Image (cartoon, rainbow, N blue to C red):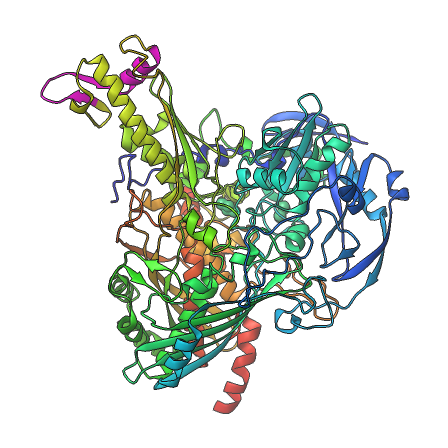
Amino acid sequence: MPAITMKVNGQAVCGDVEGRTLLVEFLRDKLGLTGTHVGCDTSQCGACVVHVDGKAVKSCTALAISCADSEVTTIEGLARNGKLHPMQEAFREHHGLQCGFCTPGMIMAAVDIVKRKGKKLDEDTIRHELEGNICRCTGYQNIVAAVKAGAASM
Amino acid sequence: MDNSTGTGIGARVRRKEDHRFITGKGNYTDDINLPKQTYAYFVRSPHAHATIKSINTAKAKKMPGVVGIFTGDDIANDKLGGLICGWMIHSKDGSPMKAGPHPVLAQGKVRYVGDHVALVVAETREQAKAAAAAVSVGYVALPHVVDVADAMGAKAAIHDVAPDNRVFNWSIGDEGATDAAFRNAAHVTKIDLVNNRLIPNAMEPRAAIGSYDTGSESYTLYTTSQNPHVARLVISAFHGLAPEHKLRVIAPDVGGGFGSKIFIYAEEVACVWASKHIGGRPIKWTAERSESFLADAHGRDHVTHAELATDSNGRITGLKVHTKAAMGAYLSTFASCVPTYLYATLLSGQYNIPNIYAEVDAIYTNTAPVDAYRGAGRPEATYVVERIVETAARELKMDPAEFRRMNFVTQFPHQTPVIMCYDAGDYAAALDKALEIADVKGFADRKSAAARSGKLRGLGYSAYIEACGIAPSAAIGSLGAGVGLWESAEVRVNPVGTVEVLTGSHSHGQGHETTFAQLVSDRLGIDINNVAIVHGDTDKVQFGMGTYGSRSGAVGMTAISKALDKIEAKAKRVAAAVMEASADDVEFKNGTFTVKGTDKKMAFGEVALSAYVAHKFNSAEIEPGLKEAAFHDPSNFVFPAGVHICEVEIDTDTGVTDVVNYTAVDDFGNIINPMIVEGQVHGGIVQGIGQALAEGCVYDKQSGQLLTGSYMDYQMPRAANVPNFNLAFTCTPCPSNPLGMKGCGEAGAIASPAAVMNAVTDALDVRDVPMPATPHVVWKMLQPMKKAAE
Ligand code: FES
Ligand code: FES
C-alpha cells in the first residue's frame, strides 16, 4: 500500500491507501472527517463535495492517490478561527437544511459557485449550478436563498 | 404569529441543531465506528422469483478477512423470528389477511430482485463485498410478476398462503346506499388512474451497527430509524432476539426518512443478531445507494377505477372506488394499513359526500415491499378525489373552484361515511386566499400570452385534506393495529434551572431540537439555550412511538406539554412552601412565581434549586426533585387541509413541463415555528412534483429486474426543476389537543401531485396523463394533437 501525503484543512496528513481507495474513504475512514457524506454510488448526489486545490470535486469519484500532495478543504475546514464561513451562516439563517445530510456538499458546492460566478448570483444561475447536488428535504427554495445571501456576504 | 424576535411559540427561531450540521459535526450512523468493528455485505437475489437449491459458502469463507457467513439456515437454527406486518386487515368475507413468511435471510425461496440471501461479515467493507461475490447460490427461476395490474391470479404464486397473490379484499362504506346514489345520479364521472410507484430516497442510505456485549449479555443496535423504540419492541417481541432490557437501540442523527426508515428491515436485524455469533464484535452495514433502490420499502403503486355521482345541481351524491394496491413480495411493517385505513378513510376529501364505497385488493408482486412513504395512503386518496372532482367539473362545464366550493364541508364536526370525523376547518377561506395569491383571474391572459410563444398553459387545483397526528390508540386498535400510537415525554429540570426534555419523537430533519425547545421556553419562561431535547436512544428515553404520520407536533409535543403541566404544578407547591404561602395563591408567569396580593416572588431557577435542596419543605408532603413524565394518547386524528394551485407551461416542441407558479394555502392550526413549517411544505411539494413529473419506479416485465436502480434512471427533482413557492396559511385551531396544532410534514406531498396533474391535463386539454408526466410522455401525447391540428 502506497503512503500519500496531503494537506487537509491546512494540516499536513499522511496515510496508507490502496490504489482503489477513494478520496472520500480516505477522509472519512482514515482521517475521521465524517462531515463529508456519501449519498450515492453513481457520482450524482453531491453529498461528498470537497475542495481540492481550490476546486469543487466529488470526493466519491476521485482516487485518494490522485489527490496526493494536494490541498483539500472539507466542511470541517471551512470555518476559520472559530468563525463560521458566511455560506455556513447563510444556510442557518435561511433554513437551508433539514436533515443536514446533503448540507456539507451543498455548502462546499455553493462556495465553489461563488468562486466561479461571483458574489452577485441570480436564482436561475444558482439553481442551474446546483445540478450536481440533490436534496430530498428542503425543496431547494431555502437553499437557493441561502446561496444567494451567502454569496453576497462572502 | 410571526413573532420573529422572540423564541416562544410562533417565532421563526433559527434552528439549534444547525450548528453541527453546517460544520460537518453531525453524527449519522455511518459516522460512528466502534472498536473491533467488522463490516457486512449482503448477498442479494438476482432473480425476481426463484427457489434456492443450494448455497455454497466454502470458497467465500476462505477469502481474506472473512469473519463469518450466515444464511437462512442459521437464522432458522437460532429460531430468530421473521419480519412482521403490524396491522391486521380482514377481508370483506371476514378472513384475515394472508401474510406469507418473511424470514430475515431467505429460506428456500427468493421473491424479488434484491431479496436478502446471505450475510457476509469481514474485516473490511471491500473484503466483505469480495467474499459476497464468491458465495455461490443455486437458483431455479420461477415465473414472476411485477405489475400490480396483472398480478392477481398470475402464474407466479408468490406465497403459498395466497395462491392468487391477493393478500386481502377489503372494503369500507355502504355499498347498497352508494349504488342507490349512482342509480339516482344526474351525471356519473368515471376515471382510471395509476398512482406510480416511488422510491423514497432519503439522502442518507440506511445503515446499522449491531453489537453484542458478552459481559452484560446485551445487544446494542445503532440504526437509521424514525422510531428506535418500535424497532426495539419488534426485534425483542417478534424476532425474539433478546428481552427489551437487554437490547438498546440508538437512532442518532438520521438523514431523512419520509417513512422509509419507520420499518424494521432484515439487514439491521441480521447485523445485530450475527454479532453474537462472531464473539460480540460490532458489525457495520451501510447501504450503497443501489441497495437503497433495491431494498428500501417503496411507496404508492396503486391502480384505481373511480366513479363520482352528481345530481342535477352539481352536488356530489356518491363516490365508488376500486383500487389494486401492490404490497411487493412481502408485507412490510405497516404495509397493510396504508391502502386501507390511511387511504380509503380520506376519500371524502373536503367534500360533503353522503355515500362512499371503496374496495381494495392488496396484491403481492415480485418487487421490493411497498409501505408508507411521505403521506402514506393520503396522497393516493387525494389523487383520486382531486382528479375525479376536477374531471367532473370539466364534464359539467362548471368552474373547478366553484364546483369544489359548492361541495365543501362547511359544518363541523362532520362525520364522513368512511370513519373520519372532521373536527375543524374552513375550506372556503383557504380557497379564497389561494385564488387571490395565484391570481387565477389573470390566468386567461397568461394562457393566451403563452400560446403566442407556442406554449401550453394549464391551471390545476388540489383541495386536500389529510388525517394525521397518528393516532388514537383504542380507535386504531379496533381497526387492527398491533400497537398504540400515543407518545411519551419526560421533562427533567436540573437544579440550576436548565431543562432536558426526553421525547419519544425522533427528528430526522423536522427540527424538534428547536420547536420542542420553543414550547418549553415559552411555557417556563426560560432561555431557549437552556433547553436540550434528547431523543433517539432507548436507554435514555422512557418510551416512544417515533416520528411519522405528522404526529410529533400534535402528539409528541402534547405529551411534553402535559409533562410541563405537572412540572408547573409541582414547582408551584415548592414555591408555595418556600414563600410560606398556599399553593393556590401562587401564580406562574414569564418564568416567575408570585404570591397573589404580595410582592413575594421567585424565579424559575430558584424554585428548581429549592426543589433539589429540599431544605424548605416537608419531604413527607413534597418529594424532592423536579422531574415529570407524561404519556399522551390523542382523542382524534388531526385534519390539516388546504388548497394548492399549480400553473404549468408545456413546451410543445420538447414536451417539457415547467411548473411556473405554485401556490399553497394550508391550515395547520397553530404553528410553533413558521420558518420550519414552510420548509416542510416546500420539501413536500417538491416530492409531489417529483412524483407527478419525474419519478417513477420501473421493473422490467420480462426479467423482473429493477430498471430504475440509480440516479441515472430514477429522476430526482433537482434545484432547476422546481420554482419558488407562494405559501400562506389559514388557521382553525385543532380542538383535540391543547396546543391547537395539526401536522405539516406530509401536506405538501399529499396535495401536489393532483394539483400538478390537473394543471397538465388542463394544459393539454385531455382527461388523463399518466404520472410521471416526463417530457417523453407529454411529447408522445402531443404528436397526434399536432397532426390533427395540421
Ligand atoms: S456520493 Fe459523491 S456524488 Fe453521491
Ligand atoms: S437537508 Fe436532508 S437531504 Fe438536504
Q: Residue furthest front?
A: B94
- Residue B580 position (above or below residue B97): above
- Quadrant in which residue B15 is drawn: top left
Query: Residue sitting at 24 percent across and 25 percent down?
Result: B591
Q: In the image shown, does B583 or B709 lie closer to the viewer?
A: B583
Q: Specify whether B169 is left or right of A64.
A: left
- Residue B363 position (above or below residue A105): below
Q: Specify whether B251 is left or right of A6.
A: left
Q: In the image shown, does B455 or B295 lie closer to the viewer?
A: B295
Q: Specify whether B118 is left or right of A62.
A: right
Q: Position of residue B83 (x, y in %)?
A: 65, 48
Query: Residue sitting at 23 percent across and 14 percent down?
Result: B577
Q: Which residues are magenta?
A: B593-613
Query: Residue sitting at 47 percent across and 59 percent down?
Result: B341
Q: Is residue B595 magenta?
A: yes
Q: Position of residue B22 (x, y in %)?
A: 48, 36
Q: Residue furthest top?
A: B615
Q: In the image shown, does B555 or B77 lie closer to the viewer?
A: B77
- Residue A62 position (above or below residue B246): below
- Residue B752 position (above or below residue B735): below
- Quadrant in which residue B511 is drawn: top left
- Quadrant in which residue B188 is drawn: bottom left
Query: Residue sitting at 44 percent across and 43 percent down?
Result: B510
Please indicate, yes or no, whether residue B263 appears anywhere in the rendered image: yes
Q: Is residue B368 magenta?
A: no
